[in-house]
Image: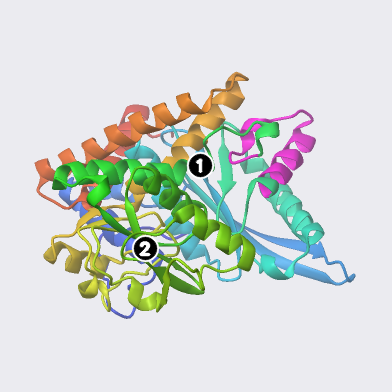
């Protein structure tokens, strides 16, 4: 079992390792908080790391065995909470890092969860729906003793969605012999999902960006935005920000980028992609190189795609004033140093994209109550939590004379550490 050490060294050779990136930020925050070695070990070690091997009979009759993981990083503040991803490049190091980030993320927004994460090594693009369902149900069955509304509550992540969550919920319910909707979040509305959940992460990004604009003396209508990723996070953020008057000058996707200095019509671009399968070739924009698009001059850059897109090799070329991290881990530790020198205002991922887990918490609460809220109430409560959390991180940064990312980590570690001290160590 890996532990976040107190002597983490990040070099150009290993800066893209997500576990080391998480360790480096943890280390700096723990040092500033003057945590003793014992508490560092407790906070820096996963509670459980589960590896399972999942046999699945494919549609053609062949048997294949897939490897899956579920990591519970901390249960000090409540059940583990975190998504499940299906991807060919899933690694245990990645899942460990994401589980620890979920611990800090839940603590930053002060919701009563610990951190968890899961993943299965597979390529869902080559699997049929029937094969995916078999894989999902068997994976769930293999880790079922560790799941439950009071133990571990999964959610969608890369290449998983509300349909996958429905399969997990049903599998768990069949094993415990009663319907248990609160075992997962991100479910279909008809199975206990929450209103406002699809927009939650993008809406959270928008809320904290608005708060950052206030600090910089900017207004939405005079703010240019570049967004990487046109999926659930980036697409929703673009749609919601455009409604408020933000000028979305560029959208970047895996297959290209489209630019319009006057601002893109996001609704029209979404329709174009539905019709053509791509954002390129949009009549009201100019196709530009997707790699170069990150370096366009803009007020706000919102990376909402993958990890490590901003690194030591390109951070000095960024021309944004505010970096709002919609994705998990889009910026490496070495890039942080460069961004600080450039005076870029960073809204770190464990704050910026916490809108999703916040509304997942609302969904869990609603399922357990059997009483569901309207969308206005969901959005109002989300705004309250994101606004309070942004203010707490900025205040922490000011008081401790550090950047927003380390301040967010310090705030999170402080809250988790406090819970551990109050509970004591069971022996």
Q: Is residue 245 above or below residue 248?
A: above
Residue 252 percent coordinates (x, y): 43, 67
Return the residue found at the far right.
61
Q: Circle 1 sits on which residue?
A: 81
Question: How far apart, in angstroms, are the residues tagged by discs 1 and 2?
Answer: 21 Å
- Residue 251 falls left or right of residue 151: left
Inspect this view and state whether residue 71 appears. no
Secondary structure at numbered mark 2: loop
Nearest the eye: 150 or 227: 227
Residue at the spot 44% in from the left edge and 49% down from the top edge:
239
Q: Position of residue 43 (x, y in %)?
A: 35, 47
Image: magenta residue range = 164-187
Within-10-Å neighbours for mark 2: few <14, some 14–19, many 20+? many
Q: Position of residue 401 (x, y in %)?
A: 9, 48
Position of 62 relative to 82 (above/below): below
> Is most of the magenta stretch helix, strand or loop?
helix
Left or right for 297, reference 116? left
On screen, residue 370 versus residue 75, left or right, reads right
The residue at the far front in this view is 283
Q: Crowding near pointer 1: few (<14 within 10 Å), some, many (20+)?
A: many
Residue at image location 46% in from the left, 33% down from the top? 78
Which residue shows up at 46% across the image and 57% down it?
Answer: 96
First of labels 1, 2 by sequence position: 1
* Left-right relation of 200 to 69: left
Of residues 98 and 309, the one drawn nearer to the viewer in this rendering: 309
Which mark lies nearer to you, 1 or 2?
2
Q: Secondary structure at mark 1?
A: strand
Question: Which residue is the site of mark 2?
Answer: 330
* Image quadrant in which the C terminus is located: top left
The residue shown at (72%, 53%) is 136
């Amino acid at each position: 079992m890996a532990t976040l050490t107190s002597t983490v060294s990040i070099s150009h050779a290993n800066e893209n390792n997500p576990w080391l990136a998480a360790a480096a930020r943890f280390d700096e925050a723990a040092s500033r908080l003057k945590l003793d070695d014992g508490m560092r070990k407790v906070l820096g070690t996963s509670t459980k790391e589960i590896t399972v091997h999942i046999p699945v009979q494919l549609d053609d009759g062949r048997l294949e065995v897939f490897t899956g993981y579920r990591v519970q990083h901390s249960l000090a503040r409540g059940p583990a909470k975190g998504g499940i991803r299906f991807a060919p490049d899933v690694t245990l190091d990645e899942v460990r890092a994401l589980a620890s980030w979920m611990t800090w993320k839940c603590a930053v927004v002060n919701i009563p969860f610990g951190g968890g994460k899961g993943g299965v090594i597979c390529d869902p693009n080559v699997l049929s729906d029937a094969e995916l369902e078999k894989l999902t149900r068997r994976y769930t069955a293999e880790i079922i003793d560790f799941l439950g509304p009071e133990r571990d509550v999964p959610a969608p992540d890369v290449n998983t969605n509300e349909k996958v969550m429905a399969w997990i919920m049903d599998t768990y319910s069949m094993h415990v012999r009663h319907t248990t909707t609160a075992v997962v979040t991100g479910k279909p509305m008809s199975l206990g999902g929450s209103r406002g959940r699809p927009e939650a992460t993008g809406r959270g990004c928008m809320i904290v960006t608005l708060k950052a604009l206030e600090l910089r003396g900017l207004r939405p209508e005079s703010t240019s935005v570049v967004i990487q990723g046109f999926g659930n996070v980036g697409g929703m953020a673009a749609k919601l920000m455009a409604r408020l008057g933000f000028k979305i000058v560029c959208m970047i996707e895996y297959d290209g980028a489209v630019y319009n200095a006057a601002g893109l019509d996001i609704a029209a671009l979404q329709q174009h992609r539905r019709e053509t399968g791509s954002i390129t070739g949009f009549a009201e924009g100019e196709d530009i190189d997707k790699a170069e698009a990150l370096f366009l001059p803009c007020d706000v850059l919102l990376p909402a795609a993958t990890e490590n897109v901003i690194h030591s090799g390109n951070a000095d070329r960024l021309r944004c004033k505010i970096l709002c991290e919609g994705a998990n881990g889009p910026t490496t530790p070495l890039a942080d140093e460069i961004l600080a020198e450039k005076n870029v205002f960073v809204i770190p991922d464990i704050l910026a994209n916490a809108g999703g887990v916040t509304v997942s918490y609302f969904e869990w609460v609603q399922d357990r109550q059997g009483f569901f809220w309207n969308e206005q109430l969901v959005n109002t409560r989300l705004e309250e939590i994101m606004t309070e959390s942004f203010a707490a991180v900025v205040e922490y940064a000011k008081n401790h004379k550090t950047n927003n990312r380390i301040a967010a980590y310090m705030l999170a570690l402080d809250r988790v550490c406090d819970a551990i001290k109050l509970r004591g160590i069971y022996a």
